[in-house]
C-alpha cells in the first residue's frame, strides 16, 4: 500500500537528486534536500485539507490528482510562479524575467524581496479566511471545545470573518506604513500595495469559496445521478467507463483543488527564497516535496485516516491560521522558516495525539459497556 501510493514520489526523489548533482554538484544536492523537507513540513496541512475534498472523488480522479495535478503544481507554482512574481513586480516581460532568473540571480532575488510584502498580504489574507470560516462554523466534533464553542456562536453573525480579516489587513498596512515612515519613508508607498494585495487575496478567496460551494452542490447531484446510472448498469449488465464514473462535477472539484493547492504554495515558494535564489534548484526541491504532499493526500484518503483521527482537520486549520498570521507579520519582520514549518507540524501532531487519546477513551468505554452488559446477562441467568 505504501509503495503503491508513494512509488511515484520515491521515483521523483531519485531523479530530482540526480539532476541536482548533475546541475550543481553535492552542494546543490544538499539545497534540494533541504527544500524538499521545507515543502513537506509547510504543506502537511495542505495534505490534510485536500484529503477532506479528495475523499469525495473516486479512484480515477485521485489518480489524475496525483499525476496530471502534480505537473500543474510543480511547473505552475514551483517554477512559473516565482518568475511571474518578478515579471509583475519589476514590470518585465516573461522571457526577460526568465533570463534574469537564470543569469542574474542576485538581481532576481532583490526583485522578489521587494515583492514580498504584496505576496505575503495576498497569501496571508487568503489563508486567514480559510481559518476564520472554519473556526466560526458550528461542528459536532470539537477539538478545543473551550475555544470553539464561543467562536461557533459568534459565527452566527453574518460576514464576521470578512470583517475581522479586513481589520487585520488594515492594521498590517498601517503598521507597515508607520514603521516605514520612521525609517525614512522608503517603503511608505508599499503600504498601499499591501492593502490592495490583501483585498485581492480576500476577493480571490470569496470567488474560490463561491465556486467550491457550487461545485460541491453539483458533486452531490452528480453522485445521485451516478448511483442511479450504476443501478441501471447492473440491471442491463453494461459496464461503465472510469471517466463516466468520475462525473463532470469531479472534474470541477479537481480544478478547485488545484486553486487551493496554489494558495497553500505561497509559503513554500516564499520560504525557498531564503535558502536559494536559483529557480532550477527551487523547482527540483519544491517539486519533490510537492509530490510527497500529493501522495500523502491520497494515502490519508485511502486509509480513512481523517475518519479515524477526527481532530486532524482541526489541527490543519489551526496551522493554516498560524501560517496566515506569520505571513502577515513577515510583511514587516523577518521570521525564520524553521519556526514557520515547526508551528504547523506541532499543531498537527497535537491534534493527532488528541485523536489517539479520544479513540482509546472510546474503545475503553465500549469495552466497559460490553463487560457490564455481559455481567447483567450472566447475573440474570
Image (cartoon, rainbow, N blue to C red):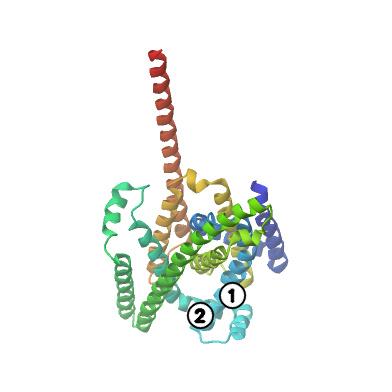
On the image, which quarter does residue 378 sit in? top left
- Label 1, on which residue? 80
Quadrant in which the C terminus is drawn: top left
Does residue 58 appear to the left or right of 25 in the view shown? left
Q: Nearer the viewer, residue 79 or 369?
A: 369
Residue at x 47% of width, y 62% of height: 216
Does residue 148 appear to the left or right of 27 in the view shown? left
Local crowd size for mark 1, using a 10 Å CA cut-off: few (<14), some (14–19), many (≥20): some
In the image, is residue 236 above or below residue 110?
A: above
Q: Are marks 2 and 1 in contact (CB under 8 Å)?
A: no
Q: Nearer the viewer, residue 307 or 217?
A: 217
In the image, is residue 304 above or below residue 89?
A: above
In the image, is residue 22 above or below residue 234?
A: below
- Label 2, on which residue? 111
Residue at x 64% of width, y 54% of height: 233
On the image, which quarter does residue 131 sit in? bottom left
Is residue 282 visible in this depiction of the protein? no
Local crowd size for mark 2, using a 10 Å CA cut-off: few (<14), some (14–19), many (≥20): some
Residue 181 point in image, percent of width and height: 31, 80
Q: Nearer the viewer, residue 78 or 105?
A: 78
Residue at x 67% of width, y 54% of height: 10
Residue 104 point in image, percent of width and height: 60, 80
Residue 340 point in image, percent of width and height: 45, 59
Point out the residue furthest to the front here: 236
Q: Counting residues from the N terminus, which is met first, the one under dot 2 or under dot 1?
A: 1
Residue at x 29% of width, y 51% of height: 149
Secondary element under disc 1, as helix, strand or loop, is helix
Q: Which mark is residue 147?
A: none
Q: Nearer the viewer, residue 9 or 62?
A: 62
Amino acid at each position: 500500500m505504501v509503495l503503491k501510493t508513494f512509488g511515484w514520489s520515491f521515483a521523483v526523489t531519485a531523479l530530482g537528486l540526480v539532476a541536482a548533482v548533475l546541475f550543481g554538484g553535492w552542494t546543490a544536492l544538499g539545497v534540494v534536500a533541504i527544500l524538499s523537507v521545507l515543502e513537506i513540513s509547510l504543506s502537511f496541512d495542505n495534505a490534510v485539507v485536500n484529503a477532506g475534498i479528495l475523499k469525495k472523488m473516486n479512484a480515477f480522479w485521485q489518480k489524475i490528482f496525483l499525476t496530471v495535478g502534480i505537473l500543474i503544481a510543480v511547473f505552475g507554482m514551483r517554477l512559473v510562479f516565482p518568475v511571474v512574481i518578478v515579471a509583475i513586480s519589476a514590470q518585465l516581460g516573461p522571457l526577460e524575467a526568465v533570463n534574469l532568473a537564470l543569469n542574474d540571480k542576485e538581481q532576481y532575488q532583490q526583485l522578489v524581496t521587494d515583492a514580498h510584502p504584496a505576496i505575503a498580504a495576498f497569501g496571508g489574507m487568503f489563508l486567514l479566511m480559510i481559518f476564520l470560516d472554519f473556526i466560526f462554523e458550528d461542528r459536532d466534533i470539537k477539538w478545543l471545545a473551550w475555544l470553539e464553542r464561543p467562536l461557533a456562536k459568534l459565527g452566527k453573525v453574518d460576514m464576521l470573518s470578512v470583517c475581522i480579516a479586513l481589520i487585520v489587513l488594515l492594521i498590517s498596512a498601517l503598521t507597515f506604513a508607520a514603521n516605514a515612515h520612521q525609517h525614512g519613508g522608503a517603503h511608505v508607498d508599499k503600504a498601499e500595495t499591501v492593502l490592495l494585495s490583501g483585498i485581492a487575496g480576500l476577493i480571490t478567496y470569496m470567488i474560490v469559496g463561491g465556486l467550491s460551494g457550487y461545485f460541491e452542490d453539483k458533486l452531490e447531484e452528480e453522485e445521485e445521478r451516478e448511483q442511479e446510472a450504476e443501478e441501471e448498469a447492473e440491471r442491463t449488465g453494461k459496464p461503465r467507463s472510469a471517466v463516466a464514473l468520475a462525473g463532470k462535477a469531479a472534474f470541477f472539484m479537481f480544478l478547485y483543488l488545484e486553486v487551493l493547492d496554489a494558495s497553500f504554495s505561497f509559503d513554500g515558494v516564499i520560504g525557498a527564497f531564503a535558502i536559494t535564489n536559483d529557480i532550477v534548484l527551487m523547482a527540483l526541491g519544491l517539486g519533490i516535496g510537492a509530490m510527497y504532499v500529493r501522495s500523502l493526500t491520497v494515502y490519508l484518503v485511502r486509509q480513512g485516516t481523517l475518519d479515524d483521527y477526527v481532530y486532524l482537520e482541526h489541527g490543519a486549520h489551526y496551522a493554516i491560521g498560524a501560517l496566515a498570521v506569520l505571513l502577515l507579520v513577515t510583511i514587516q519582520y523577518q521570521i525564520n522558516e524553521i519556526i514557520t514549518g515547526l508551528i504547523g507540524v506541532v499543531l498537527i501532531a497535537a491534534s493527532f495525539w488528541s485523536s489517539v487519546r479520544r479513540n482509546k477513551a472510546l474503545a475503553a468505554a465500549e469495552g466497559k459497556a460490553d463487560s457490564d452488559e455481559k455481567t447483567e446477562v450472566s447475573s440474570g441467568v
